[in-house]
Image (cartoon, grey):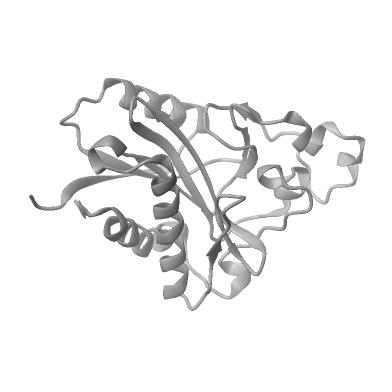
Amino acid sequence: MGPMKLRLKHLEIGDYRQTWAAMREFTESRTDSTEDEIWLVEHPPVYTLGRNGDPAHILTHHPSARDLPVDIDDIPIVKTDRGGQVTYHGPGQLIVYTLFDINRLGIGVRSLVSGLENAVIATLSQYGLRGEARRDAPGVYIDGKKIASLGLRIHKGRSYHGLSLNVDMDCRPFTAINPCGYAGLEVTQLRDLGVRVKPMEAAIPLIRAMADEFGYQCF
Protein backbone atom coordinates (compact mmCIF):
# COMPACT_ATOMS: atom_id res chain seq x y z
CA MET A 1 0.00 0.00 0.00
CA GLY A 2 1.44 3.36 -1.08
CA PRO A 3 1.34 6.65 0.81
CA MET A 4 -2.07 8.14 1.52
CA LYS A 5 -3.11 11.17 -0.47
CA LEU A 6 -3.40 14.55 1.19
CA ARG A 7 -5.28 17.40 -0.44
CA LEU A 8 -4.08 20.97 0.03
CA LYS A 9 -6.61 23.79 0.09
CA HIS A 10 -5.52 27.45 -0.04
CA LEU A 11 -8.12 29.73 1.55
CA GLU A 12 -6.15 33.00 1.35
CA ILE A 13 -7.51 35.28 4.15
CA GLY A 14 -10.67 33.83 5.66
CA ASP A 15 -13.09 34.76 8.42
CA TYR A 16 -12.50 32.59 11.49
CA ARG A 17 -16.12 31.71 12.20
CA GLN A 18 -16.84 30.79 8.58
CA THR A 19 -13.71 28.65 8.35
CA TRP A 20 -14.55 26.92 11.63
CA ALA A 21 -18.07 26.13 10.39
CA ALA A 22 -16.67 24.73 7.15
CA MET A 23 -14.27 22.47 9.08
CA ARG A 24 -17.11 21.11 11.20
CA GLU A 25 -19.23 20.48 8.12
CA PHE A 26 -16.36 18.70 6.35
CA THR A 27 -15.69 16.52 9.40
CA GLU A 28 -19.36 15.65 9.93
CA SER A 29 -19.95 14.73 6.29
CA ARG A 30 -16.77 12.84 5.49
CA THR A 31 -16.76 9.07 5.04
CA ASP A 32 -14.17 6.36 5.50
CA SER A 33 -12.97 6.96 1.94
CA THR A 34 -12.71 10.76 2.18
CA GLU A 35 -9.16 11.92 1.60
CA ASP A 36 -7.54 13.94 4.35
CA GLU A 37 -7.02 17.64 3.77
CA ILE A 38 -4.86 20.51 4.95
CA TRP A 39 -6.32 24.01 4.78
CA LEU A 40 -3.92 26.95 4.61
CA VAL A 41 -5.31 30.31 5.68
CA GLU A 42 -4.64 33.62 7.38
CA HIS A 43 -7.31 35.16 9.59
CA PRO A 44 -8.26 38.77 10.21
CA PRO A 45 -7.50 39.74 13.85
CA VAL A 46 -9.37 37.48 16.30
CA TYR A 47 -8.92 36.00 19.78
CA THR A 48 -10.10 32.41 20.15
CA LEU A 49 -10.84 30.66 23.42
CA GLY A 50 -10.77 26.85 23.67
CA ARG A 51 -13.81 24.91 24.80
CA ASN A 52 -12.48 24.61 28.37
CA GLY A 53 -10.65 27.92 28.26
CA ASP A 54 -10.72 30.37 31.15
CA PRO A 55 -11.86 33.87 30.12
CA ALA A 56 -9.64 35.27 32.87
CA HIS A 57 -6.71 34.74 30.50
CA ILE A 58 -8.16 37.42 28.22
CA LEU A 59 -6.72 40.54 29.77
CA THR A 60 -9.04 42.86 27.85
CA HIS A 61 -11.42 42.22 30.74
CA HIS A 62 -8.81 43.44 33.23
CA PRO A 63 -8.47 47.11 34.26
CA SER A 64 -4.82 47.07 33.16
CA ALA A 65 -5.93 46.51 29.56
CA ARG A 66 -5.91 50.27 29.02
CA ASP A 67 -2.11 50.17 29.47
CA LEU A 68 -1.53 47.64 26.71
CA PRO A 69 0.49 48.91 23.74
CA VAL A 70 -2.18 48.21 21.12
CA ASP A 71 -5.83 49.11 20.54
CA ILE A 72 -7.68 45.83 21.05
CA ASP A 73 -11.25 47.08 21.35
CA ASP A 74 -12.20 46.00 17.84
CA ILE A 75 -10.71 42.48 17.97
CA PRO A 76 -13.51 39.91 18.39
CA ILE A 77 -13.36 37.08 20.91
CA VAL A 78 -14.69 33.73 19.68
CA LYS A 79 -15.32 30.78 21.99
CA THR A 80 -14.55 27.75 19.88
CA ASP A 81 -14.53 23.96 20.25
CA ARG A 82 -10.82 23.24 20.00
CA GLY A 83 -8.69 22.24 22.95
CA GLY A 84 -6.46 24.68 24.77
CA GLN A 85 -6.85 28.14 26.22
CA VAL A 86 -6.74 31.51 24.47
CA THR A 87 -4.65 32.57 21.48
CA TYR A 88 -4.53 35.28 18.88
CA HIS A 89 -4.74 35.00 15.09
CA GLY A 90 -3.98 37.79 12.66
CA PRO A 91 -2.58 38.60 9.22
CA GLY A 92 0.99 37.42 8.75
CA GLN A 93 0.40 34.24 10.76
CA LEU A 94 0.23 30.93 8.91
CA ILE A 95 -2.73 28.78 9.97
CA VAL A 96 -2.61 25.10 9.02
CA TYR A 97 -5.84 23.23 9.65
CA THR A 98 -5.36 19.47 9.75
CA LEU A 99 -8.47 17.53 8.73
CA PHE A 100 -7.12 14.04 9.31
CA ASP A 101 -8.68 10.63 9.90
CA ILE A 102 -6.41 9.65 12.76
CA ASN A 103 -8.02 6.22 13.07
CA ARG A 104 -7.01 5.52 9.48
CA LEU A 105 -3.53 6.89 10.19
CA GLY A 106 -3.33 4.49 13.12
CA ILE A 107 -2.30 7.18 15.60
CA GLY A 108 -3.70 8.71 18.75
CA VAL A 109 -4.02 12.32 19.81
CA ARG A 110 -0.61 12.43 21.50
CA SER A 111 1.09 11.13 18.35
CA LEU A 112 -0.79 13.68 16.25
CA VAL A 113 0.36 16.52 18.49
CA SER A 114 3.95 15.26 18.53
CA GLY A 115 3.94 14.82 14.77
CA LEU A 116 2.76 18.38 14.20
CA GLU A 117 5.34 19.72 16.62
CA ASN A 118 8.07 17.69 14.90
CA ALA A 119 7.03 19.08 11.51
CA VAL A 120 7.30 22.65 12.81
CA ILE A 121 10.70 21.92 14.37
CA ALA A 122 11.93 20.41 11.09
CA THR A 123 10.70 23.50 9.22
CA LEU A 124 12.46 25.86 11.60
CA SER A 125 15.69 23.91 11.20
CA GLN A 126 15.61 24.64 7.47
CA TYR A 127 15.80 28.31 8.39
CA GLY A 128 18.70 27.69 10.76
CA LEU A 129 16.52 27.92 13.87
CA ARG A 130 16.35 25.47 16.76
CA GLY A 131 12.81 24.87 17.97
CA GLU A 132 11.72 22.62 20.80
CA ALA A 133 8.51 21.13 22.14
CA ARG A 134 7.35 21.12 25.75
CA ARG A 135 5.49 18.20 27.24
CA ASP A 136 3.57 20.44 29.65
CA ALA A 137 2.53 23.03 27.05
CA PRO A 138 1.88 21.88 23.47
CA GLY A 139 3.43 24.01 20.76
CA VAL A 140 6.92 24.92 19.59
CA TYR A 141 9.30 27.31 21.32
CA ILE A 142 12.56 29.08 20.52
CA ASP A 143 14.60 30.18 23.53
CA GLY A 144 11.47 29.93 25.68
CA LYS A 145 9.34 32.07 23.38
CA LYS A 146 6.40 30.51 21.59
CA ILE A 147 6.45 30.56 17.81
CA ALA A 148 3.79 27.94 17.03
CA SER A 149 0.57 27.02 18.82
CA LEU A 150 -1.57 23.88 18.58
CA GLY A 151 -5.26 23.41 19.21
CA LEU A 152 -7.21 20.37 18.04
CA ARG A 153 -10.65 18.83 18.12
CA ILE A 154 -11.20 15.09 17.59
CA HIS A 155 -14.66 13.98 16.47
CA LYS A 156 -15.32 10.31 15.73
CA GLY A 157 -11.65 9.65 15.16
CA ARG A 158 -11.17 12.64 12.86
CA SER A 159 -9.29 15.83 13.65
CA TYR A 160 -9.88 19.43 12.77
CA HIS A 161 -8.43 22.79 13.81
CA GLY A 162 -4.62 22.50 13.79
CA LEU A 163 -1.63 24.80 14.27
CA SER A 164 -0.53 28.38 13.82
CA LEU A 165 2.99 29.56 12.99
CA ASN A 166 3.97 33.18 13.62
CA VAL A 167 5.68 34.39 10.46
CA ASP A 168 5.46 38.13 9.76
CA MET A 169 2.74 39.70 11.90
CA ASP A 170 1.95 42.33 14.51
CA CYS A 171 2.50 40.40 17.74
CA ARG A 172 1.32 43.18 20.07
CA PRO A 173 -2.22 41.75 20.47
CA PHE A 174 -0.65 38.77 22.28
CA THR A 175 0.08 41.18 25.15
CA ALA A 176 -3.67 41.38 25.80
CA ILE A 177 -3.86 37.70 26.76
CA ASN A 178 -2.01 35.03 28.68
CA PRO A 179 -1.02 33.05 25.57
CA CYS A 180 -2.29 29.49 25.88
CA GLY A 181 -3.06 30.21 29.52
CA TYR A 182 0.49 31.05 30.63
CA ALA A 183 0.94 34.44 32.25
CA GLY A 184 4.02 36.23 31.01
CA LEU A 185 4.64 33.83 28.13
CA GLU A 186 6.44 35.67 25.34
CA VAL A 187 5.87 34.96 21.68
CA THR A 188 8.19 35.32 18.73
CA GLN A 189 8.00 35.03 14.95
CA LEU A 190 10.20 34.24 11.97
CA ARG A 191 10.64 37.91 11.05
CA ASP A 192 12.03 38.78 14.48
CA LEU A 193 14.48 35.88 14.13
CA GLY A 194 15.87 37.17 10.85
CA VAL A 195 13.77 35.04 8.49
CA ARG A 196 11.99 37.18 5.88
CA VAL A 197 9.32 35.02 4.24
CA LYS A 198 5.60 35.29 3.65
CA PRO A 199 3.21 32.89 5.43
CA MET A 200 2.47 30.84 2.31
CA GLU A 201 6.20 30.58 1.60
CA ALA A 202 6.72 29.10 5.05
CA ALA A 203 3.90 26.66 4.28
CA ILE A 204 6.00 24.91 1.62
CA PRO A 205 8.61 23.30 3.92
CA LEU A 206 6.01 22.83 6.66
CA ILE A 207 3.66 20.81 4.46
CA ARG A 208 6.56 18.70 3.20
CA ALA A 209 7.62 18.02 6.79
CA MET A 210 4.06 17.07 7.74
CA ALA A 211 3.78 14.72 4.76
CA ASP A 212 7.01 13.04 5.82
CA GLU A 213 5.90 12.84 9.44
CA PHE A 214 2.55 11.17 8.73
CA GLY A 215 3.31 9.32 5.49
CA TYR A 216 1.24 11.37 3.05
CA GLN A 217 1.54 12.09 -0.63
CA CYS A 218 0.50 15.70 -1.29
CA PHE A 219 -1.47 16.76 -4.35
Q: Is residue 47 left or right of residue 7?
A: right
- The residue at 40%/35% (across/down) is 160
**Residue 101 picture location, percent across and down:** 28, 36
Residue 55 x/y as whole percent: 74, 29
At x 83% / y 31%, what residue is drawn?
61
How many marks the image carries: the answer is: 0
Quadrant assignment, res 72: top right
Task: Using the image as rendered, state which of residue 151 and residue 7 is in the foreground.
Answer: 151
Residue at 73% across, 53% down: 172
Quarter assignment of residue 133: bottom right
Q: Is residue 118 visible?
A: yes
Identify which residue is drawn at 56% across, 27% down.
80
Q: Nearer the viewer, residue 28 or 201?
A: 28
- Whether residue 101 is visible to the viewer of this picture, yes or no, is no
Q: Position of residue 24 (x, y in %)?
A: 39, 24
Relative to 187, residue 179 above or below: above
Q: Is residue 214 left or right of residue 16?
A: left
Q: Which residue is the extreme one toward the bottom?
A: 128
Above/below status of 41 relative to 157:
below
Left or right of residue 91, residue 100 in this image = left
